[in-house]
Image: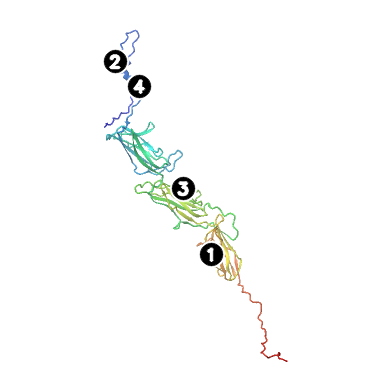
Amino acid sequence: MSAPRPAVPRSCPRALRAPRALHAKARPRGLRRPRLPGAPLLAAAAGALLLASLAPACIERGYPLAGSGQVELRADVAGPLFAADTLDEAGKPVLPRQSPWRTAVSLKLTEANEPAYGGYVEVRAVPSEALALHPVERDQEAGASCGVKDGAFRCTAGTQGYARFTAASEGDWSGEARLVVSWADRTEELPITILPAGLPEDAANFALIAGGLGDSDRVLATYVPLMCTIGPLPDDLGATWRPGAIRAREARVRASPPLNAPGVVEHAPVIIESLHSEAALSLTPDCLERTSRLRVLLGATGESPPFILCFSDLGGEVKIAVSSGQKALDPIPSLTVDPEPRLLRVRALRSVVAAGTPGDLFEVSAYNAERVRIAVPVDLTVGDDQVIALGGASVTLRGEDSEATIIQGVAVAPGTTTLRVTPRLLASPECSSEPVTVTPEQKPEEDAEEDTETETEPEPEPGAGGGGSP
């Protein structure tokens, strides 16, 4: 059993003086030759020369811990660390970032169950890109130190055998890392988990909250740009993203932290991504600057700042993917965005019809900005229901995948009227057809032949008349 080695103080003498006898002045020529110095004087001179040769080298405190020594490691942060989410041009993490991303690590060095004051070990991270090692600025006991020496990170134990340093995640690497302490022919390891930036698996209540959608998660049409026609379609019906009139909904992302780590949600990055070409994300209500992918940071309460969901006039089934670290919303949130009609065509199939005649009277179709026929619910009325009676008061117009919608009715009485069409449950805009005239009912033609009476002679009685024998 070896006793602890004493620490050698770090000191460098300014100058090492030779024995005084070496500084005696040379005697002038002609005088009596001096006697050769004796053995003690030669030994002193040799010692002076040896000290002079060692003078440039400073003796540092510390010694390599012996193989019989023991090392204990303990990290101040008991849970995982978080990797950086984004790096700048210099490869440094962009702040603010999610905590904890660094931890202080304590080393305890002993020999023969006694503090190994002055003993030193080397520390490295495996893999090297996982963690960066730094000296601590405070909480270091007397005589202890950690830092780079001869190309290696070295920690020297203080008076009580302790030393401290900091291990930090300064890149976007994530996985299982190790701190390896080596001395003599021995090693000691401390595993450290580095999670990708974002919410851990045990975070709760992760959700996308959007306003103005109602219980059905539906974005309704406004019908503001709706125009009417009774003839052919125009060549251009306008842009699908109308500047200043883009449909938008304010949204947020929220999450609750794990009970054992209440602070991990702050600055946790969340990625929101539109999976539909007719939906986008923006940070401004007018949606003039749009993107398909947005990154937001959760606040201290676990809620993100507001952002905007933007929808074009073409609409569709929109899916919004939301993910953060080890969490992702599943199933992916889905919204139904009604297409915004641009043109409603109401066309009369017959301009004149006789009273009492049922049949196909009108054709009604709605078109989007790309001149494609779309399904739109509408209400139907006539200017004078005493002239024409319709088969129904509302209908959903057919889309491009089927024939145009035909409105049937019955011509009731002579007169002139039009078909009026409005979006369902709305009073405007109202589109009208060409006038349809109902003429008086035509009676069925009677036989032109008149009834005439003809006389027929009665049949002669048998054996009577002028047919007797001569």
Element type where label 2 sits in the image? helix
* Residue 445 image position (x, y, % from top left): 63, 75
Q: Which mark is nearer the camera, 4 or 3?
A: 4
Name which residue type carries label 4.
Answer: Ser
Task: Say which label, 2 or 4, has the lower sequence index.
Answer: 2
Residue linked to disc 2: 39
Residue linked to disc 1: 380
Relative placement, left or right, of 364 versus 87 is right
Name which residue type carries label 1.
Answer: Leu
Relative placement, left or right, of 359 versus 256 is right
* Distance of label 2 from label 4 (alpha carbons): 21 Å
The quadrant the C terminus occupies is bottom right
Q: Are marks 2 and 4 in contact (CB under 8 Å)?
A: no
Name which residue type carries label 3.
Answer: Leu
Q: Most extreme residue toward the bottom, as rendered? A: 470
Residue linked to disc 4: 53
Task: State whether residue 62 is above or below residue 384.
Answer: above
The crowding category of the residue bearing disc 2, from other C-alpha atoms within 10 Å (few below 14, some 14 to 19, many at least 20), is few
